Amino acid sequence: MNVTVKFHKQIDLTNLGKFEKHCSQNIYDDYSEEKRRRMLLKAAVKKEVPQRGGVYFLLEDGVVIYVGRSIDLQARLISHVSTSEMMGRVDGIAVQYVDDLPMQYVIEAVAIAEFMPEFNRLGKTV
């Protein structure tokens, strides 16, 4: 079986200000810089990532630092924004749409072997 890792969509997060109008709250209330960034990241994900299955790639300076898969990319990425410390380093997201769950597992494994992302290897012997 020939499996190809390809980005169907890339989202540049270096200028989060362009997503201000998509925030559900006023980001200039008394929020910390980190809280404002998380609010803008959520707005970016809601605007740019559909609620469908696939494999996602978190990028820092164009380098893949984490690969994951989900049956709902939007929900999973919003979960990362809410809970993950690595999101402070992320300046881009790429997605490959794959609705077939077994194929998501295969593409995720191939992508991890290809990119060897830092956060997929932490605590693991490679």
Image: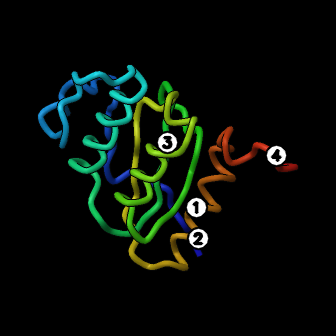
| Residue in the image at 39% along x and 51% along y | 78
Q: Position of residue 106 (x, y in %)?
A: 59, 70
In the image, taking residue 70 as reference, residue 116 lies left or right, namely right
C-alpha span from label 2 to label 4: 20 Å
Q: What residue is disc 3 on?
A: 58
Q: Residues within 10 Å of mark 4 (few under 14, many from 20)?
A: few
Q: Is residue 101 left or right of residue 15?
A: right
Q: Quarter of the image containing the N terminus?
A: bottom right
Tag 2 near tag 1, CB within 8 Å: yes
The CA distance from mark 3 to mark 1 is: 13 Å
Callout 2 amino acid:
Tyr
> Which residue reaches farthest front?
30
Nearer mark to the viewer, of 3 and 1: 3
Instruction: Report x, y in % for residue 110.
Output: 62, 60
Of mark 1 and mark 4, the one earlier in the sequence is 1
**Label placed on residue 81:** none
